[in-house]
Image (cartoon, helix red, strand yellow):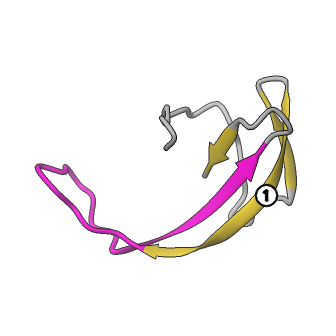
Amino acid sequence: MAFLEANNQLEVSHNPPEQLSFARENYRRVDSGTAKMTHQGIIVRRNAQRCQYFDYESPNDKVLSI
């Protein structure tokens, strides 16, 4: 289980790199792909049905998901 916190302080391109640094941690990409999204509850202006994701881990077991 991971508790995720939204953050807009990381600039990434449409194809994030294999490795990146954020908040004084180095991360290595461990997974990527596309996923089907479903909506529950009231969602304002969210029409996407699929998304692309990139998951990273640090040597300290921290997780970063884009």
Q: Position of residue 52 (x, y in %)?
A: 55, 69
Q: Position of residue 4 (x, y in %)?
A: 49, 37
Residue count near mark 1 (Cα–Cα under 10 Å), binned few <14, some 14–19, many ≥20? some
Q: Callout 1, which amino acid?
A: Arg
Extreme residue in the left direction: 41
Position of residue 24 relative to residue 60, above or below, is above
Q: Position of residue 19 (x, y in %)?
A: 88, 52
Extreme residue in the top direction: 24
Q: Which residues are magenta?
A: 36-57
**Is label 1 in a helix, a strand or a loop?**
strand
Q: Is 4 inside the magenta-drawn segment?
A: no
Q: Does residue 19 appear left or right of residue 49 in this picture? A: right
Provide the residue designation for mark 1: 29
Residue shown at the point (67%, 69%) measured from the top left: 32
Q: Does residue 16 appear left or right of residue 65 in this picture? A: right
> Which sits in the foreground, 17 or 59?
59
Q: Is 45 inside the magenta-drawn segment?
A: yes
Number of numbered tags placed on the structure image: 1
Residue shown at the point (79%, 57%) measured from the top left: 29
Quadrant assignment, res 7: top right
> Which sits in the foreground, 36 or 7?
36
Residue shown at the point (48%, 35%) measured from the top left: 3
